[in-house]
Amino acid sequence: MEIKPTVVIKPEDLTGQSRFAWNLMISWISQLVLIFSGFIMPRLVDEKVGQAALGIWDFGWSFVSYLTLVGFGMGACFNRYIAMHRAANEIKDLNKVANSVVFVQLIIASVVVTTTVVFYFSLPYFFSESLQEHTHTGQWVILFLGFSLSMQMLSGSARGLLTGYHRWDIHNSLHAGDSVFSLILMVLALYFTELGVVGMAIGYFISTVTFETLRFISVKKICKEFTFNLRLSNFATCKEMLKFGIKSMLSNVPPIILLQTISIILVSSIGPAALAVFARPMALTKQIKTFMAKFTLMLTPTTGAMLGSKDPQAIQALFINTTKLSFAFCLPSLGFLFIYGDQILALWMGDDYASKHLIMILSAGLLLSMGQDSSIRILMGMNRHGRISVIALLSLMTLFVIGLLFTGVGNLALTTAALLFVVPMSIVYGIWCQHIPAVS
């Protein structure tokens, strides 16, 4: 009688650590695609329709960025709960959480659409003097970008499910595909229509609808334990998710509020063309931060899964190792921008955008806050980021207001605007937050 060898089936790693390197590689490759599209479009817009139109495009994104506040941090951030319940084999709780988030996201998407329409009609009353002949263009840009955001809000539950299952590779591949498709549509709008940046916004909207739909299809194929049934949602779970989402939003949104407030002050003070100059070196530092975020965002569901597996020592080791890796990545990357950033700007956008002092301030000033990003992501996975988030928000805006009182609003210099951003960021996220006890 022939004896067949025993096949040992290795259990699936529900913490996602075995997929960490693969997910990070795909994330960074997809980010290279985003960088490619991000570098091409501003130069094309500047050459095709001018610096003022580019400023209108940046202005539209500044307004839409405020709309992210309507989301209350919901969406992908609940991946911590998905990973935790899946690791503990609590499938009923997983479905209760996921369907509760879907229900809340439906409401949030409706609010975003309504708010976008209000922005569309109120823009001439508040910014017609600053935008002048570009006011009508600004209205349409805000309208289609806002509708795109509402679709992203609606699909936030799909993002949370995919990343809760540690499928960052699929999540980021869809994101990269969206970027490429929107780039193609925006280039076509610029060169084959007379719509300008309005055509770009329409192309972005079409691409968003297409790829967010594909995200829902991916959830159906990957997340086998998930069952879509809004009857599984309940008020208590919705309330818990909103509470967690608001704390997460307070962790993520303060830098967005600060930057977009500075952007709007620049438009009101010295015009949209100045914002176009300010936004380009900021975009370079943002690319490095995004690479960093592709790494640190994976730490939240991984930490949640470790909690579900009852492994606190693994969380401590994760914190120490990832903080070291964060600084190992940020220091040379920002150092390169500090030295060669103006030359990159000149090659990318032309000499009019190559401000050496501006890029030096931004690259040096963001090192501390960027290098500490892993700590807040791990705290989010532990659901211990509430107190730190509130203190960070209040401290950041207080320091900004104090700085603005000294500098003034009228004729704000670009380097001064950069200092108003990096100084509060370094003090709050680079120093203060590291000494605040973590309390939920």
Image: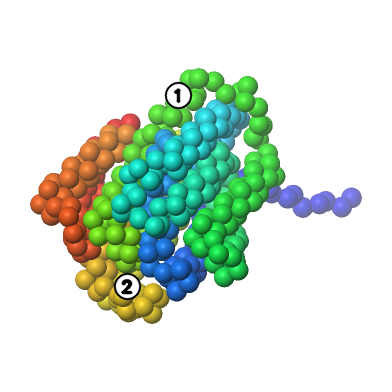
Q: Quadrant of the C terminus?
A: top left
Tell us which disc is closer to us: 2 or 1: 2
Residue 156 seen anywhere in this rendered image of the structure = no
Q: Residue at (38%, 54%) from the top-left corner?
A: 59
Mark-to-mark CA distance, 2 and 1: 47 Å
Q: Quadrant for residue 164, please give it.
A: top right
Residue at left 22%, top 38%?
Answer: 394
The image quarter in which residue 192 lies: bottom right
Q: Label for residue 3?
A: none
Residue matched to label 1: 239
Residue 267 percent coordinates (x, y): 29, 56
Observer-nearest residue: 10 or 198?
A: 198
Question: Foreground: 399 or 161?
Answer: 399
Residue 16 % position (x, y): 53, 48
Q: Is residue 252 left or right of residue 169?
A: left
Asked which secondary structure carries label 1, the reply is helix
Q: Are marks 2 and 1 in contact (CB under 8 Å)?
A: no
Task: Give the quadrant of residue 253.
Answer: top left
- Coloring scheme of the render? rainbow
Q: Give, as a three-letter code, the residue at label 2.
A: Tyr
Q: Residue at x 21, y 71 (%)?
A: 357
Residue name at image x 52 percent, y 30 percent: 107
Neighbourhood count class around disc 2 (C-alpha, 10 Å): few under 14, some 14–19, many 20 upward: many
In the picture of the structure, the residue carrying the numbered disc 2 is 353
Q: Residues within 10 Å of mark 1 (few under 14, many from 20)?
A: some
Kind of residue at disc 1: Lys
Judging from the image, what secondary structure is the residue with disc 2 in?
A: helix
